[in-house]
Amino acid sequence: MAEAKRGRFADEKADFNPRTWLTKYRRNSIGYLVKMLLFYHGIGVGLLVAGTLILEQIIPGYQEPDIPRSLIGVLSAGPLEETVFFGVPFYVFNSSHAVIVTGAMWAVLHIFNTPNIELASLAFGNWLFVIPSLFFSLRTWASGKGWFSVVVHSAWNGIFFAAGCWGGDINCTMLEPDPFTNFLMAGLSAALLAGTYVLYRWRKKREQAATGRIQ
């Protein structure tokens, strides 16, 4: 009855509103998070397509950069980037406003995902695509489902890696040429995931202690 009074998709409409983009989701079930994922990534695709068309008109010779990629590299990006720029700041500062700062840094770094630091070679399209993803990750961590953001990040990268390899759009390898780099990425991913979980437990204990004092 309460659901009927609020109207169908009331939670979705509220979470789609940009005014709520620094808050946790109204629901955090996996199905609901998938809806939010499609919403934010849909905006990202729109920004990528429209932005690239505009950039090609205003920057002579503009073209999205093409750099060699390895499977271990794109999959490791999920745990590495999500923990460093979203999970760790969120649990340390317990603030979405802190995460918007680190998330903005993460988004800007995508511009320089290019072999040549020249205006016509900067990855502006990639940057436009990840701006909405910033808010998806921020809100997913704030909603207590950071692990989902890590999995989605790696899975999304893996899908585009496979598509790019299949279409011949990117130079693909399974591993990096340097074995130490492969070991480092895998080791750092595991260490950061473990460290983020420790911070999560620490934050939960602080919140429980604060709740106990209030009661």
Image (tube, rainbow, N blue to C red):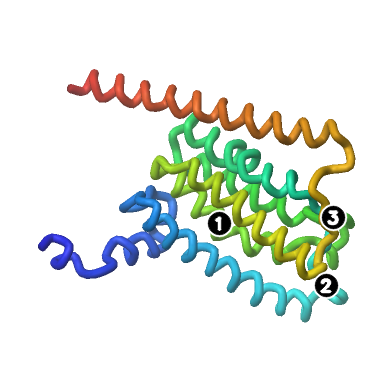
1 vs 2, front mark:
1
Q: Which residue is under mark 3?
A: 68
Image position of 209 with respect to 110: above or below: above
Q: Position of residue 199 (x, y in %)?
A: 49, 26
Image quadrant in which you'd find residue 185:
top right
2 vs 3, front mark:
3
- Residue name at image x 49 percent, y 36 percent: 90
Q: Amino acid at mark 1?
A: Ser
Q: Amino acid at mark 2?
A: Tyr
Q: Which residue is under mark 1?
A: 133
Left or right of residue 12: residue 172: right
3 vs 1, front mark:
3
Image position of 133 with respect to 195: above or below: below
- Residue name at image x 28 percent, y 67 percent: 9
Q: Position of residue 22 (x, y in %)?
A: 43, 50
- First in sequence: mark 1 or mark 2? 2
Q: Which mark is residue 108?
A: none
Q: Amino acid at mark 3?
A: Pro
Image quadrant in which you'd find residue 48:
bottom right
How many angstroms separate mark 1 from mark 2 (CA)?
24 Å
Name the quadrant of the N terminus: bottom left
The number of discs equals 3
Q: SS at mark 2?
A: loop
Name the quadrant of the C terminus: top left
| Residue at the limit of the structure toward the left, as seen here | 1
How many angstroms separate mark 2 from mark 3 (CA)?
19 Å
Q: Which residue is under mark 2?
A: 62
Q: Nearer the viewer, residue 203 or 60?
A: 203
- First in sequence: mark 2 or mark 3? 2
Q: Position of residue 40 (x, y in %)?
A: 50, 63
How many angstroms separate mark 3 from mark 1 (CA)?
23 Å
